[in-house]
Image: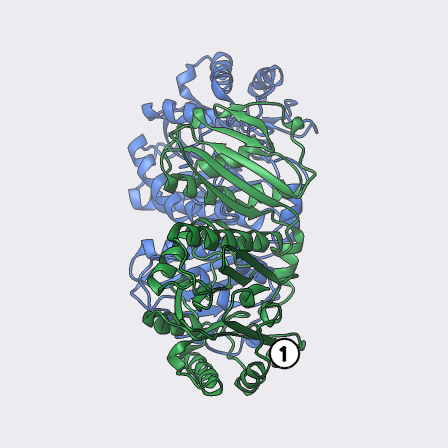
Chain colours: A blue, B green
Amino acid sequence: MSVTAAKGFQAAGIAAGIKENGNPDLALVVNTGPRRAAAGVFTSNRVKAAPVLWSEQVLKSGELTAVVLNSGGANACTGPKGFQDTHATAEKVAEVLEIGAGEVAVASTGLIGLLLPMDKLLPGVEAAAAQLSEHGGEKAAIAIKTTDTVHKTSVVTQDGWTVGGMAKGAGMLAPGLATMLVVLTTDADLPSDVLDQALRAATRTTFDRVDSDGCMSTNDTVLLLASGASEVTPEYAEFAEAVRTVCDDLGQQLIRDAEGASKDIKIEVVGAASEDDAVEVGRSIARNNLLKCAIHGEDPNWGRVLSAIGTTKAAFEPDQLNVAINGVWVCKNGGVGEDRDKVDMRYREVHIVADLAAGSETATIWTNDLTADYVHENSAYSS
Amino acid sequence: MSVTAAKGFQAAGIAAGIKENGNPDLALVVNTGPRRAAAGVFTSNRVKAAPVLWSEQVLKSGELTAVVLNSGGANACTGPKGFQDTHATAEKVAEVLEIGAGEVAVASTGLIGLLLPMDKLLPGVEAAAAQLSEHGGEKAAIAIKTTDTVHKTSVVTQDGWTVGGMAKGAGMLAPGLATMLVVLTTDADLPSDVLDQALRAATRTTFDRVDSDGCMSTNDTVLLLASGASEVTPEYAEFAEAVRTVCDDLGQQLIRDAEGASKDIKIEVVGAASEDDAVEVGRSIARNNLLKCAIHGEDPNWGRVLSAIGTTKAAFEPDQLNVAINGVWVCKNGGVGEDRDKVDMRYREVHIVADLAAGSETATIWTNDLTADYVHENSAYSS
């Protein structure tokens, strides 16, 4: 279902030959209207890929008609030629769809520092356009995979309108944003400022709180396109919740498919003086390599949780910290709590609660364990 | 030679039975005078182990007569009982040496969240005191090892005076400070404020710039004791340089022995607008798991260097960044530079230069690669 679950969208996914292994690598998503409202959120990495610079620019109009995405190359750190290639890609999409290049967002994912094979990509745009279909969402989702083992899609349908989407991402996942590429579509009839508000609110508590390996991408892009084809204008709260639900679901799928991971770790920070404190503490825990190794070894090593909390500026007193792992309060008042042998670590999901005992704010960050497979996947070849 | 290279010091290292495997686990260092000046620098982690809290307190006098160190348990996150145990340890040392407990610093290293076996530790203090010797420095260095594969010592001798030291540390190495335990001794005749100044200056550019795994310990302690036994009062600059040299040497030994590492990575940031910018960028690169995996795989993946730089607030323009790996400028002006196939990655030391092209300040950070062995060592058992 993916990006074509909502009415007013067509999509395609093909193998253009950008990837040397012949796997699908080019996706096209087209909004057939009647509306063209759109919003986007991009990586906060200051080293931004050419397609991010391009898409930020075209989105200033608040409208998009098409998104072209490629895997097999990030087109990041590729200089003026890289930007020219992104521009040429948008122009090609515009030509085959008979629209303007300023209505086309571009997204790329893959190895940084390589120019894209434009002799494969541009003919690929024509081939993809020829296959555009209201049932093409799944193929599009497959074509944006890199090291993903599965493609990721999600749909929420309400009274007469729908939000759907696709995502790719398996490594270099860290806040701001936490995923490589996401395209969301809706047939709700809403203007771009409402889309922007709902999208920013959703990503702040979903993708921005997925932190698989602490590494922030140069290419992160989340787009939301609205066709208005349902002729329904939902209440803001209802729409925002639908967008949040789809983002949350896709974010969870990213964590479950993270490179080499054997555990999904939910870090719930409670008792914080502020939400910012809770997020800072959650991220610090999520990025502690020693803890991530311990979780991999099914070792409820709460000392590594405390040492991670201790590196933050959050409000807390060391002798009031409490930590539960899978429901067992192994650390109480900064010291030894319940018997750590009671902690059952056999399952894939691990739930850590860190209680700062300093207030009532909370935040949840998701991460993965650190495994030999992660090291292998990220050392055996360039990605 | 270690902590007994300088005149006026005795040391011992014994197996007290704190470690279940029977390896040496208790060290004692005693300043026999005539002077007792001392200085210390401690972890900036807000979750501080009991011995850190104790030693910070006793050092306020600017004097120390003895340091007792144990491996086999960090005595961190152990609550009031843990602090009582540290106090009892200092009292025991004071009793056997016939000094005051306020002259005794305590340092511990090992697993967080476990109480120390005081029934083993206190008799161990007596046994260690009985073996104190002017040749005991090496045994002391051996007794503070945890996952270290080798013990670490260093000595600099000048005209009539000496600075020597020992260190332990192999994991949980990150700035502020970067090592678990270090004791330095000198027979120079200098007051505590001069020791403090020299020690802080030295650690700022040595231990603080060693970042093996981004994880900051609860127990980091660096002590400098001066006996005055040489009856020489060196010039400050000369003394400070000797302290810095010993710290730098010990810091390098920590990196070379980092858990599971197969590469030592020197990250030299140049062209920075400020030293702070250079350090921030160096640390960001040093903590990028994807880059550390790539280096392990002998892959000169400069895109991961740029994506790490891009997460900082340092002054730079993305299209002016340059990166060299082992002498080959693989990234020029933010894009593709020399042929990456020219980079020879076969050797243990890897040298990354990141040029921010924004000024003339520099800083060097040392780190290691991320390996399956690191994951294994930190997941197979609690440490």
Circle 1 SS class:
loop
Residue tagged by mark 1?
B15
Q: Position of residue B100 (x, y in %)?
A: 39, 83
- Crowd around label 1: few <14 · some 14–19 · many ≥20 (10 Å): many
**Whether residue A41 can be seen here:** yes
Q: Nearer the viewer, residue B65 or A209?
A: B65
Position of residue A318 measured from the top left corner of the image (x, y, whole percent): 37, 69
Q: Nearer the viewer, residue A134 or B253?
A: B253
Amino acid type at image mark 1: Ala
Between residue B314 and residue B162, name the one nearer to us.
B162
- Residue at image x 52%, y 36%? B305
Q: Quadrant of residue A20?
A: top right
Q: Position of residue A159 (x, y in %)?
A: 38, 43
Looking at the image, residue B10 sits to the left or right of residue A60; the answer is: right
The chain identifier of the residue carrying mark 1 reads B
Up-down: is B28 above or below A131? below
Please report the residue visible at 40 percent of the width from the left and 46 percent of the height from the top: A244
Quarter of the image where the C terminus of chain A is located = top right
Percent position of residue B98, x then y: 44, 86
Query: Is A50 situated above or below B173?
Result: above
- Determine the image quadrant of residue A131: top right
